[in-house]
Image (spheres, rainbow, N blue to C red):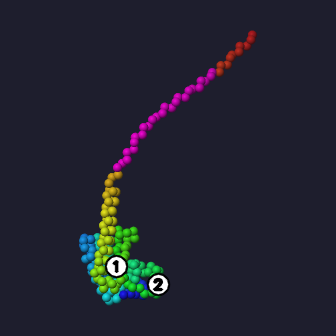
Amino acid sequence: MERKIQDFIDAVENDEVEHFTSKTPQKAFYADPDKAVAPLAAFIREQIGQDHLAQAETTVNGTDISVRLELSVINLPLQDTKTIAKIMDVAETAPLNVNAVIETPDINVSGLRIDALAPADTYVAQTDTADASLHDWLKLQIEKLQTAAENAKEAAAETDQPKAELKQPATKTTTRKSATKRKTPTRKTTTKKTTPKK
């Protein structure tokens, strides 16, 4: 399965893409992520069989986590068509791959992680291998999210603890007696009285 780059960009911008969306309870997502994304994988395979561009997404209830499977000519989210046009030769034809995408602020600094799982044709022809790749990918992302959650808890616990006040050693204040200045003796100037001679 392949597309001319320009045709792919035009199709995405005109939303000529088949969409599937679902919601997954938070507990169910962490307990059995494979089950949560199984409908997404089935939908993508169905659309590949019909030679359609497709995007399948599940959002995790009570969180800002979203997991997607997308068909694309490059390892970039579908919405980044402007970037695709800049870095690829739009006159060329490229094979379509199935990309796995997770979006949440806790996954990394950019809040998004995307990885190619398999070429579209392989994703259909080698189902078990493709599903194993998705399983490993999901496991890794969940481990990252759990680590981020633990780090956030530890950071919150540290900020909640009252900081021990640092006692400064008492400084003795010594008052120096100022030396008494000697008074300079004031000389009395006596004027002799001269008695006039008789």
SS for dot 2: loop
Which quadrant would residue 39 be assigned to in this image? Answer: bottom left
Image vertical order of residue 8 relative to residue 103, above or below: below
Q: Position of residue 121 (x, y in %)?
A: 34, 86
SS for dot 1: strand
In this rendered view, identify the residue nearer to me: 67 or 74.
Answer: 74
Is residue 17 visible to us here? no
Q: Badge 1 local density, few (<14 within 10 Å), some, or many (20+)?
A: many
Please indicate whether residue 128 sits to the left or right of residue 85 in the image: left
| Magenta part of the chain | 164-188
Q: Position of residue 76 (x, y in %)?
A: 40, 78
Image vertical order of residue 104 relative to residue 125, above or below: above
Does the magenta portion include 177? yes
The residue mark sitting in front, 2 or 1, is 1
Residue sitting at x 37%, y 75%: 114
In this rendered view, identify the residue nearer to me: 121 or 102.
Answer: 121
Residue sitting at x 46%, y 80%: 87
Q: Quadrant of the N terminus?
A: bottom left
Q: Which mark is residue 89?
A: 2
Please report contact status of discs 2 and 1: CB closer than 8 Å, yes or no. no
Q: Position of residue 161 (x, y in %)?
A: 32, 54
Residue sitting at x 42%, y 37%: 172
Residue sitting at x 31%, y 88%: 49
Toward the right, the furthest residue is 198
Image vertical order of residue 169 relative to residue 28, above or below: above
Could you tell which of marks 2 and 1 lies nearer the N-terminus?
2
Look at mark 1 in the image and give the residue it sits on.
117
Does the magenta portion include 50? no
Is residue 109 visible to us here? yes
Image vertical order of residue 122 relative to residue 106, above or below: below
- The chief SS type of the magenta part is loop
